[in-house]
Amino acid sequence: MAVLRWGLIGGGEGSQVGPAHRMAARLDGLFRFCGGALDVEPNKGIRFARSLGADDDRCYGDWREMLDRERDRPDKLDLVTVATPNATHYEIASAFLAAGFNVLCEKPMTMRLQEARDIVRLVEKTGLVFAVNYGYTGYPLVRHMRAMVGRGDLGRIRLIKAEFAHGFHADAADSDNPRLRWRYDRNLAGASAVFADAGIHAFHMACFVSGQSATEVSADFVSIVSGRELEDDAMLNFRMDEGAIVRLWTSAIAVGRMHGLTLQVFGEKGGLRWAQEQPNQLYWTPLNGRTEIIERGAAGLSPEADRASRVTVGHAEGMPLAFANIYHDLADAIVARQSGPRFDPFDCNYPTARDGFRSIAAIEAAVRSAADKGAPFPIDPS
Amino acid sequence: MAVLRWGLIGGGEGSQVGPAHRMAARLDGLFRFCGGALDVEPNKGIRFARSLGADDDRCYGDWREMLDRERDRPDKLDLVTVATPNATHYEIASAFLAAGFNVLCEKPMTMRLQEARDIVRLVEKTGLVFAVNYGYTGYPLVRHMRAMVGRGDLGRIRLIKAEFAHGFHADAADSDNPRLRWRYDRNLAGASAVFADAGIHAFHMACFVSGQSATEVSADFVSIVSGRELEDDAMLNFRMDEGAIVRLWTSAIAVGRMHGLTLQVFGEKGGLRWAQEQPNQLYWTPLNGRTEIIERGAAGLSPEADRASRVTVGHAEGMPLAFANIYHDLADAIVARQSGPRFDPFDCNYPTARDGFRSIAAIEAAVRSAADKGAPFPIDPS
Amino acid sequence: MAVLRWGLIGGGEGSQVGPAHRMAARLDGLFRFCGGALDVEPNKGIRFARSLGADDDRCYGDWREMLDRERDRPDKLDLVTVATPNATHYEIASAFLAAGFNVLCEKPMTMRLQEARDIVRLVEKTGLVFAVNYGYTGYPLVRHMRAMVGRGDLGRIRLIKAEFAHGFHADAADSDNPRLRWRYDRNLAGASAVFADAGIHAFHMACFVSGQSATEVSADFVSIVSGRELEDDAMLNFRMDEGAIVRLWTSAIAVGRMHGLTLQVFGEKGGLRWAQEQPNQLYWTPLNGRTEIIERGAAGLSPEADRASRVTVGHAEGMPLAFANIYHDLADAIVARQSGPRFDPFDCNYPTARDGFRSIAAIEAAVRSAADKGAPFPIDPS
Amino acid sequence: MAVLRWGLIGGGEGSQVGPAHRMAARLDGLFRFCGGALDVEPNKGIRFARSLGADDDRCYGDWREMLDRERDRPDKLDLVTVATPNATHYEIASAFLAAGFNVLCEKPMTMRLQEARDIVRLVEKTGLVFAVNYGYTGYPLVRHMRAMVGRGDLGRIRLIKAEFAHGFHADAADSDNPRLRWRYDRNLAGASAVFADAGIHAFHMACFVSGQSATEVSADFVSIVSGRELEDDAMLNFRMDEGAIVRLWTSAIAVGRMHGLTLQVFGEKGGLRWAQEQPNQLYWTPLNGRTEIIERGAAGLSPEADRASRVTVGHAEGMPLAFANIYHDLADAIVARQSGPRFDPFDCNYPTARDGFRSIAAIEAAVRSAADKGAPFPIDPS
């Protein structure tokens, strides 16, 4: 497979997500970092891109310049990653899609539902490869859970218990810290804080594993640290289109919890438990049977899990490799799309534009439910 | 301390809770089993009481006979435990209270809120020792959590995450099993199944540890296994009188979860995590600090925890010893009451009649909220 | 079953092991504490026995007085527990055996091998019930391991990895503390410290679970805290009579380890792992299969495990209940012996005089091996 | 930093270690894979190198050809990784060193001690960068343990308990499998099997963390599965030059253990525990204090740990990233060496030639001790 050309927007010096994207893109040697527009300050971005080994003629001062100059190159970028501040995702991603680029967009895909719908339509129209970065579904054992559910090991899925709870925004003395403050300000962060930022990963994972979509939500949002407009702790109950219930807790004030992304899936024929902090073990209990520990890399796993594994059993794999699986899948999708008309941009291992839309729809409905004392609110299906 | 005289109602042959009470009463040598009415079938009960070493003249065919014959004895029973089917708790407990006996009543204390109020008034009037058996609060490290909260280690309590989730009612093929069936039948079990039966322990523990009372609840009840009238899975959000929020999940269909009683307490200054299945470790994270493992029996614990511990650090203690702590506390209370007027029957280590009332009130409010799509419902405070 | 009469020697006020014996004897209601000689100071012992509810005429100033007065009573004690300082075990236990009493002796059974041989012969001669208190084998899941090995689930046993490592003697500044000091003094403690005190439990458990006896040992003893004559850390390799190897580490300086009694058993057809600090779960991996978690109290366990369990699955059981299983087995043995000639005092669930002998033999051989740079040393078989 | 030129010998299609090296070299973008000799079959190796994107003129049929053609290129390879079968390491590594290349050599560095001594001298003479791939010391929390020991947090180190126990060679029915068979054949694998292959990682880690060297060893080797010449289970006791004791268990027949590389370090002032399978948590118990959980990525860690971390706290990192830290350190060393004379090839974060030598010396001494019934044997110090 030829090495694909990859460009990055955002993710400049000091960014947390930038290095993760660069590691993930690089890990399997499928992408070459060609260049991009890495910083709001043009000179800083150009300098940083150069220091990372970008091609001289592909270090840009801003994304518009990048778009102008890249759109007609014969050696077009195969993938553009958008890792800029949230409010700019829609404008940049849709511009690059419209110009014919495959895009990996950081979450949230957009700030508003109508914009998310636009992205879906652009992808439908162009047939381009497009992903939203709910990267935790790249873990091999998350893929294995989905495979087990898909092949019926659990029977009908009854209930999913999902969590994403951390304690890193718990310090009231730190709440004026600008790094934190904007997250709880409605004007800067949008309609939701901890659910849109953290809990949404758990939501997407519940959908990904169950293969179901949410139709209704009841939400209890609270702003625990004083001075915050938006929620820093939330409990949500979802109804899914094939009957499952998803109960989701997310928190930023849970002192002692580090990352706290966990999933428990309960079906007619068994239950599964998985935690992102110990991602190489999956606990499976068949109905009336004993709990078994499924090890990543062990013999007898699903092809989906095997394909997403890189080292032998007993060796820990972590988040950067999960993330790299998204890039690996994107590489496969880019090649598949190039090789024929049968590529479906919404039927992929990675989170698609439709998943991005559904997440935004879930956030909007949850915000309304929370504002109405938790009354159930329907979730826009399309 | 003289050995106290103890009688038992219910808990006959084959009962699960009977042996637990007998072990707990016996463990510290503070109570002697004198007799009781152990079975609905008089002869069986009498025979069984004898086989357990009861005094010949104190083996009764039913509780009314027992009450008649015991009430005027000079060597009156110091404590009567009521471990009969739920629907009979009120009648028996109130009759023995009215006759001047100290009572330990299995939960639920009553089936209706008005009855619970009656019990509280009887205890107020008589000043007798009365406990409801939420026995899990007898664990040393649960006592330690309460002590830490009480002395301010966590600052103001913000949020409690409580769970009691098991999977032993998950098998649809087993749902006609008479042992299970009655639990989900409104006529036999009352207005709530899994919350009233299992989740209520987590609710009481949240109140016990936080020292707060619930004022409002929003509940989502679902009957997952078909044919069940009552809920087998529930999510509840409580507001507490001093501002804490309690999020409580309880389930009987969570295949792979064994007992699943856990508590996480988050305050301004730190967080705590504890699980009934590994009760000898408590995880404490001070704000901005490292998680510490607090071992039962280690040096430096609270007097409340030390007092409830029996063996040295590193040795597991389990549920029967937690339970025995309730009996130990009752013995102390009985002695305290005998020795002076300063005994307050509502200010005790063990769960009091007021705790029993609050639990019933919480169940009633939760049932109403669940019936009204989760709209918040106030909880009767008194 | 009639309640058995039980007497105690040692275990006075402030003793650690005394309360454990009293709880264990009391828990199932099979024994009644009648009296004993509880303290080296006669008056203290008499007072304490009374405070515990002993019969007035059975509170003794010392064990010789007790023996004199008890030996000819018609209502003879059914069981005498010896919980005095180590150096006195032999004299007391053999005297009571010789006078026809059933005995539970704290470990070590004796200080010298010849004395241990005497005890075995006394038991052979009298056919009395005699146990040494390696109480950790009373845990239900330890019994289950033995049952699994016995019925061949693991095939031939290849290797056992046993540990008993704690860190409570690690503080050099505390080493003059009289509570610690005697333990490392050859004149007071005998030839071995941490192996004889702690590691020996792991040794006995390895024998109990495998059903094999040790024939040879190679030992590396070290005295890590300066000023200690005897070892505070040791590594031992045993050869067993049916081919298994036991590797045993024991330590008193392993800071952070609390109790650290663990067993791993590896056979041709699978492996087992168990830890005393989390005694309600056993990890079982069939060869080429997945690890399964066996829960105490779950369906499908061996009769040996079921019999030793008291509460339902998911509820923690701890050390005092394991200990109580030894008492329960003793009660059964006492009744079996009374009811006929088929009782074999060396074929029991509890650790017998022969187990006591083998432990002393292992200690003696280990001490010699350690003194000879770890050269393998045979263990006296009889 | 300019991207360094990297070549690979061995690690062809189907190799396990090859992909790990490629991921590790690529992850931080510090090395570019230029080419190499990847397979014993020349054409296969050339084809595979091309498929991985090697430069056309740097795909070689064998390592001699590679050496001939690379030695005089102006754009010399900055690092050559040797990942060929064990018996060839010495010849290839020494040839490349002699020709002036920096080398990363898979373990074991050599098959004989004299060869290892040669490598050390070559490195002394040339001052080149040379590492042996004990890659597990690349884990951030292993670096943190070393830092804690180095700065005195534990006081004098008393004892290290090290393990590397797996169960993947336990199946007697599989022992004729050629993939396994050579490992236990003295002619093919050398003098030791499981210790040289697995346990040696634990040995190096103990040295790395303690900063001490082994001076003496006593070993118990057993061949458990019949038909094996070499040991598949071993217990070793080491004496270290600054007084620590290392007790090391390694096994290939421990069914249920997956990787089982763990380290426990006990000093005068505290103890540490770490396990490769859960590498993002380190357990630290200060003397007389509570166990604390140190999280990779948390605030307040040592610079050594911070430098080796790539993603934020709570996100799992795994073995490929640990491995990449070795490559990162090598890149730094290569640059340091180029920039001045102060580079010391034996004072590095990664395992040096001297570490390689010491491991071979430890294996040789252990084999002799095991052959002499565990009599202590000195380890060649230089």
Image (cartoon, coloured by chain):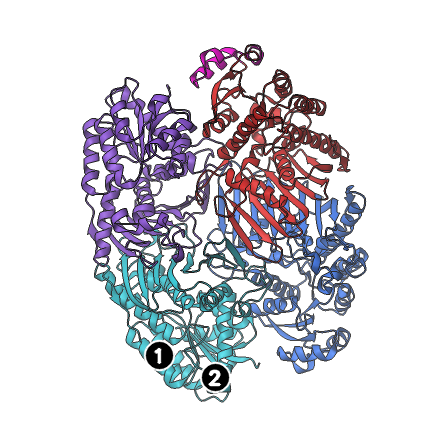
Chain colours: A purple, B cyan, C blue, D red
Q: Secondary structure at mark 2?
A: helix
Indicate the chain on which mark 2 is placed. B
Q: Front-most of D262 and C202? A: D262
- Alpha carbons under labels 2 and 1: distance apart: 17 Å
Magenta-colored span: D41-68
Which disc, if any, is residue B120? 1
* Residue D119 percent location from the top left of the image: 67, 23
A312 displayed left or right of C123: left
How packed is label 1: few (under 14 Cα within 10 Å), some, or many (20 or more)? many
Q: Secondary structure at mark 1?
A: helix
* Residue A331 percent location from the top left of the image: 34, 26
* Kind of residue at badge 2: Arg
Q: Which of pointers 2 and 1 lies earlier in the amino acid sequence?
A: 1
Q: Front-most of C54 and B140? A: B140
Residue C63 to residue D146: above or below: below
Indicate the chain on which mark 1 is placed. B
**Magenta segment includes B191:** no
Residue A343 to residue C132: above or below: above
* Same chain check for tags 2 and 1: yes
Figure quadrant of the N terminus of chain A: top left
Which disc, if any, is residue A202? none
* Residue C208 percent location from the top left of the image: 64, 51
Q: Front-most of D300 and B164? A: D300
Residue under pointer 2: B337
Q: Front-most of C142 and B153? A: B153
**Looking at this rendering, what residue extends furthest in the front direction?**
A43
* Kind of residue at badge 1: Val
Confirm whether residue D263 shows in the render. Answer: yes
* Residue C60 percent location from the top left of the image: 72, 78
Figure quadrant of the C terminus of chain A: top left
